[in-house]
Amino acid sequence: MNISPRLKQILLVLLEQEEVISVKQLAEKVDISKRTVQRELESINHILKEYQLSFHSKTGKGIWIEGKEKDKQSLYQKLKEVHQVDVNDKKQRRRQLIFEILKDKEPQKLFYYANLFGVSEATISKDMEAIEEWFAWMDLKIVRKQGYGVSLEGSEKGYRLALRRFMDENIKRDVWREMINWGSDTVLKKTYELENEYYELIDLSIFDQVVECMRSMQKTKISRMEESSYLGLAMHLAIAVERLKKGNFLEQEEEDESDWQGEEEWILSCDLGERLNKLFGIRMPKEEISYICLHIKGARLQYVEPEEQIMPAKQEEVEHLANELVDAFGGGVAYELKQDEELMKGLSVDLQAMVVRIKNKIPTYNPLLKQIKENYPMVFRHTKQAVGFLEERLKATIPEGEIAYLAMHFSAGILRMEGRRENVRKVKIGVLCASGIGISKLMESKLEQRFHERVELHCYAFEDVNDRVEEQMDFFVSSLRLTQQELKTEVLDVSPLLPEQDMIAIEDKVFQYAMLPPKKEKADTEFTKQLEEVSLMVSQIKSILASCSCMRVEEHISFEELVQAMAEKAAIYPDYQYDIQKDILKREKIATQIIGDMGFALLHARTNGVLEPMILVCVTKDRTPFIDPYMQNIRAVIMMLMPKNKNTKQNGQILGFVSSSLIEEEEFLPTIFEGEETAIKQYLTKLLKQYFNHYLDTV
């Protein structure tokens, strides 16, 4: 059917209408002008006539198509099958040009492509130049020779990568997912995806058989692959089988893989290769087995078995990379993060597979990329900066999807680190399913594997949840959709298989509830409440004493530089530094905190830059006043910080007492001016002891 893209859109809209539609409404639906619609409608009758249909219009009423319903449906289905490119859409035209080159892989003259897209040879020539970069990533080159035409040159490996990349970019991920679960024929008919000609790049019957072959390999690394790696391996194998059947083989690599003999991935690759040989009547050479092995080595797994170890030959190298990455993440928390065995092992395992993927240009897809960038922007940004050394070493750009996977490890590590600092409690989670036996037990097992001692898990059927159970649980995770029967306690709706996005949501809730006091039971007494308040006061005072420190700087430092230096000292990781600076300077603009008559500045603010109240002192190295005119006569700067929206009342009372002591206690300021950290902490301890004793009398 020879029809313009615009006319196709117009006809589809008209055929979908049950009533008369105005030209204006039609133009709005198709997103073109009324004049353009009227011009396109001039050629509509010759198409409709073939299907025993007719076009009608009436001034003041609108336009419509008349005819039998079965004839309308016949034309509608034919239009849906027509795949066309809007030649005025440069991006779409060039995407289609890549597809045509991959599909043919035979020399074609510029005239052929110009005629195919209905544009000039000069336009096609510019398009060729524009898409060269896309092919270059796979070490493929578009070669144009006078009198010969345009051809694609490069390795067989590069060509297969290009096929895989194009399908990754242009075929919906959820369609691939459904094809793995239900088979391509069922899914494509159901979703009307057969109109997408991009499926011509892969033999879908081979793809279905490959998936069944992979599915038969239970209790192996293949069965534990994450969805993206599982799909990637299936696509690679389907392409490889089809190319081998056509006599196209991978080139022999210079790298020697003889040291892989005996490794789990190599044995698994050989087994998979033999199964495919029997299934398709082919013979996979060693180069094909090696490339399968690379895909398995580069795969991300849903979970790692406890007995699984990093390859001994790579152990030291991978652990060194993980250490370098944590150091590059920086922010003064590297040492503490390195004490987290779970973080270091997770990074090491992921880095080992990631390096394989990057070196061999094996594409990866991270469905959580957007979520991680939005929910953990600071961690993602620092991880992106941290992988810079790795990009230099690998001489390659690390995609954001890979960076996001590493950021997930850092996010979890930071949450655990903050939890240790916050004296967190165990969180009680109720796991709900229909029976409380089957799915809930599987969910419980996965949650236990992820959170270990951080949570206390209890499985329930919905009908077993009563007021007493709700009083004990912090929150529930449920595989049911509790729309009709709402619980008073918070419920997270999750998939029974607990994919990573659900795990991240649960992780956030675990951290949130771990920071809160435990749920009070009805038997709580006033005495219990008093104990909790006293315990909180003790915790806050201990935090102030533990974090109190004194720093020394050059006397010529400017006020802004001083605030920056003190904020950097106070921040547990870099992004918090900027919050502290911003909030201190904002408070200073409201009313200056420089008290020149008494020789000190009292900088204080409520900020998201700290997790607990903190006092920090700064003096010059020779104990003389600062030179900056803004700080004239100032011999010491005291910075008091307290977290926003957390124990505000208690923190305000404590820091308020310390502030008043600067004036009321004769020896306090002189001690601070001396700039000896030990003496300052001793004096502060004495003051806070007095405050605490007075506080106990008021409870």
Image: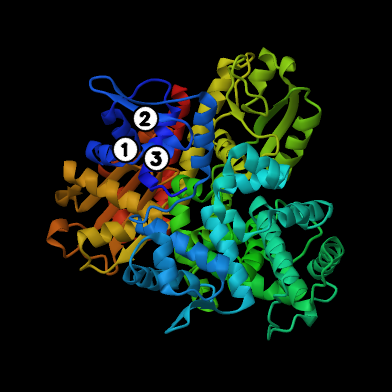
Mark 2: few, some, or many residues within 10 Å (few <14, many ≥20)?
some
Compared to residue 90, the image places residue 328 above or below, namely below
Of residues 477 and 615, the one nearer the viewer is 477
Task: In the rendered structure, find residue 393 and report the number of the disc placed on it.
Answer: none
Q: Quadrant of residue 504?
A: top right
Q: Earlier in the sequence, mark 3 or mark 2?
A: 3
Kind of residue sitting beneath label 1: Leu
Q: Is residue 325 left or right of residue 62?
A: right
Q: Does residue 332 appear in the picture of this structure? A: no
- Secondary-structure class at tag 3: helix
Q: Residue at x 57, y 38 (%)?
A: 505
Label 2 to label 1: alpha-carbon separation: 9 Å
Pointers 2 and 1 in contact (C-beta within 8 Å): yes
Pointer 3 residue = 46
Mark 1: few, some, or many residues within 10 Å (few <14, many ≥20)?
some
Q: Earlier in the sequence, mark 2 or mark 1?
A: 1
Of residues 94 and 543, the one nearer the viewer is 94
- Secondary-structure class at tag 1: helix
| x, y percent for residue 430 | 69, 27
Label 3 to label 1: alpha-carbon separation: 11 Å
Kind of residue sitting beneath label 2: Phe
Label 3 to label 2: alpha-carbon separation: 10 Å
Q: Residue at x 51, y 77 (%)?
A: 151
Mark 3: few, some, or many residues within 10 Å (few <14, many ≥20)?
few
Kind of residue sitting beneath label 3: His
Q: Earlier in the sequence, mark 3 or mark 1?
A: 1
Pointer 1 residue = 41
Pointer 2 residue = 55
The mark tally for this picture is 3
